[in-house]
Image (cartoon, grey):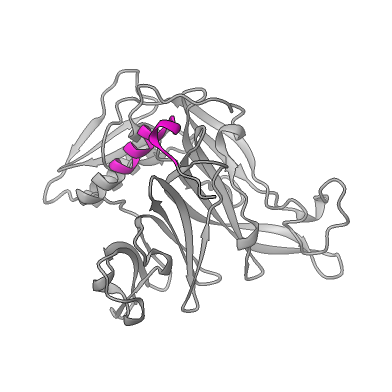
């Protein structure tokens, strides 16, 4: 039996469709994230962008007018190549989210939002060795609307067991993903992908509800809040930890903007198997709970109702975890710190020929880093 949805059966449909309209308006206005590109250590530049399939697709994918996402690779010698992210070569609409590069396996990671009717989900694509792999991040049960994914790669030194059960020091990469999801509740979610011993663990991705990790789960309420004030979770490197991150996100249960530190166990030999299980095989960190994040609250601030924009909202964190939110507004960059007195309007940095947008963004980030 085919299940259908109508607006009358979806209590959050108006807000969800408004989110889609906001995303499309941003794209149509030429508003895009500044970080859908990444530069590797060897000087290769990778960029994800929106294009018409007819303009970038190879012959075997056809020459239709469908919108697609494409990856442009610019090598250190200046030569370029462009290829379509395969799962975007259809009639659905996609928005680019973020891109990262993992040096040890020479892998490009990108996340994006795929819109299908009045639903959307977050897709995860990776490119290495000339081939693509795709994954859909598992949404909550029922109707869902996911958007604004962000990713970050960190490196962790950890202790594992060799084939004889002896401890051995290793390094692994951790790809952290955050995104916003609307289902029966509105919340930010987190998942991690691990690269260990050259193996990418794509089949053991577990999403976590960030509201629950702060101890404030339950019914959510976005009454009176503009979408741009709460639908942009972000992830940041945390140099004070061993491969950990800080995530900044709005919790609509307690109406707070949270900064949460997430770390992972770094001595897998001390972990025990799940209750009822057998002994963990040597070198099997996922079975030994080595992939479970440990959360610690860094700070919480009131959600700012003055962040009203069709542009993507970025976040910079100070050393002690104070967020500064900033976004483009025509020929200006607007920004506001979370520790500003209540009622403080966003500040403005006007762009000039000698103060282009990227320098202005860098100045805001530098200011935000000061405690």
For image coordinates 58% across by 26% down, the residue present is 218
The quarter of the displayed image where residue 6 is located: top left
Give the percent coordinates (x, y) of residue 139: 54, 46
Q: Does any portion of residue 371 appear in the rendered image? A: no
Residue that sits furthest to the top in the current view: 342
Residue that sits furthest to the left in the current view: 353
Residue 214 against residue 141 in the figure, above or below: above
Task: State yes or no: residue 19 in magenta.
Answer: yes
Total marks placed = 0
Compared across the picture, whether 258 is left or right of 29 comes to right
Task: State yes or no: residue 28 in magenta.
Answer: no
For image coordinates 36% across by 26% down, the residue present is 225
Compared across the picture, whether 166 is left or right of 259 comes to right
Residues 26 and 256: in front is 26
Give the percent coordinates (x, y) of residue 86: 41, 69
Residues 55 and 336: in front is 55
* Residues rendered magenta in the picture: 5-22
Give the percent coordinates (x, y) of residue 82: 32, 74
Compared across the picture, whether 309 is left or right of 142 comes to left
Residue 331 against residue 201 in the figure, above or below: above
Q: Does any portion of residue 292 appear in the rendered image? A: yes
Residues 303 and 218: in front is 218
Give the percent coordinates (x, y) of residue 220: 50, 26
Compared across the picture, whether 242 is left or right of 335 comes to right
Residue that sits furthest to the front in the current view: 1
């Amino acid at each position: 039996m085919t299940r259908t949805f109508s607006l009358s059966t979806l209590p959050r449909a108006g807000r969800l469709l408004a989110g889609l309209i906001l995303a499309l308006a941003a794209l149509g206005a030429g508003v895009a994230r500044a970080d859908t590109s990444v530069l590797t250590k060897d000087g290769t530049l990778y960029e994800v962008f929106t294009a018409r399939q007819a303009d970038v697709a190879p012959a075997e994918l056809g020459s239709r007018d469908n919108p697609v996402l494409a990856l442009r690779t610019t090598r250190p010698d200046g030569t370029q190549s462009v290829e379509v992210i395969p799962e975007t070569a259809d009639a659905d609409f996609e928005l680019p989210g973020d891109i990262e590069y993992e040096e040890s396996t020479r892998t490009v990671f990108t996340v994006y939002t795929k819109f299908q009717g009045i639903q959307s989900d977050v897709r995860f694509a990776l490119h290495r060795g000339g081939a693509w792999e795709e994954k859909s991040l598992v949404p909550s049960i029922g109707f869902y609307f996911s958007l604004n994914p962000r990713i970050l790669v960190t490196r962790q030194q950890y202790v594992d067991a060799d084939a004889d059960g002896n401890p051995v020091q290793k390094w692994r990469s951790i790809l952290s993903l955050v995104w916003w999801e609307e289902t029966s509740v509105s919340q930010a979610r987190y998942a991690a992908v691990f690269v260990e011993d050259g193996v990418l663990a794509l089949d053991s991705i577990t999403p976590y509800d960030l509201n629950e990790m702060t101890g404030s789960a339950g019914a959510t309420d976005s009454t009176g809040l503009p979408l741009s004030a709460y639908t942009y979770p972000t992830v940041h490197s945390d140099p004070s930890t061993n491969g950990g991150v800080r995530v900044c996100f709005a919790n609509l249960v307690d109406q707070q903007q949270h900064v949460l530190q997430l770390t992972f166990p770094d001595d897998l030999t001390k972990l025990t198997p799940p209750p009822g299980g057998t002994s963990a095989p040597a070198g099997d960190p996922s079975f030994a709970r080595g992939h479970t994040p440990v959360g610690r609250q860094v700070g919480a601030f009131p959600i700012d109702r003055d962040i009203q924009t069709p542009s993507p909202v970025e976040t910079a964190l100070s050393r002690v975890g104070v967020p500064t939110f900033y976004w483009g507004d025509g020929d200006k960059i607007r920004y506001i710190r979370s520790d500003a007195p209540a009622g403080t309007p966003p500040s403005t940095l006007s762009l000039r020929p000698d103060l282009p947008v990227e320098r202005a963004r860098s100045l805001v980030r530098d200011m935000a880093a000061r405690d």
